[in-house]
Amino acid sequence: MEALYTAEALATGAGRNGRVATSEGRLDFTLAVPKELGGSGDGANPEQLFAAGYAACFHSALQTVARAQKVSIVDSSVGARVQIGSNGEGGFGLAVQLEVVIPDLPHEQAVELANAAHQVCPYSNATRGNIDVDITVSDD
């Protein structure tokens, strides 16, 4: 792959109870284990960052596909839920649910756009076959 852009981030401290920042300083977060996993919950966590990145990336892919098909999706949105749990083998795994909303577009056409975006999105391509990704298209 020929890289078009490279993002860099550095995690310091105690991993999930530390800090993460990007090299140019645009992102700089205190991290904390979520309360649901026994932590304080007083900071961001990798699953939140992954959900934000996947939602934004998928929405961009959706817009790219719509533009190519000359379809207007002005008020569209993509929500992402990232879950972490035991993989049953002593480690952990992730699962993702994406919710695509494209108001004023017939449901079947919205589903087609979401499926096409899933083929274009770099996050989808990176996770395909590695984690469960469920895509739901809602009408509102």
Image: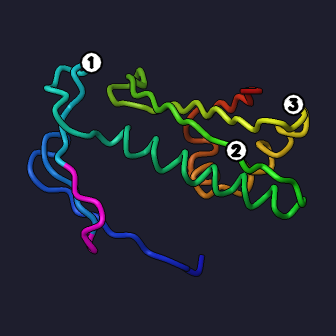
Q: Which residue is rendered at x = 39% and y = 70% of the image?
A: 7
Q: Which of marks 3 and 1 is nearer the N terminus?
A: 1
| Residue 36 image label | 1
Disc number for residue 75:
2
Above or below, comparing residue 13 to residue 133 in the picture: below
The picture places residue 102, in percent across and down from the top left corner, at 75, 38
Q: What stretch is highlighted in magenta?
A: 23-29
Residue kind at label 3, given as amino acid type: His
Q: What residue type is labelled 2?
A: Asp
User: Is residue 76 highlighted in magenta?
Assistant: no
Report the residue at 10% width, 45% height from top. Answer: 14
Q: What element carries label 3?
A: helix
Q: Do tag 2 and tag 1 residues touch (Cβ < 8 Å)? A: no
CA separation in Å, label 2 and label 3: 15 Å
The mark nearer the N terminus, 2 or 1, is 1
State the CA–CA distance, disc 3 to disc 1: 36 Å
Mark 2 to mark 1: distance in Å? 33 Å
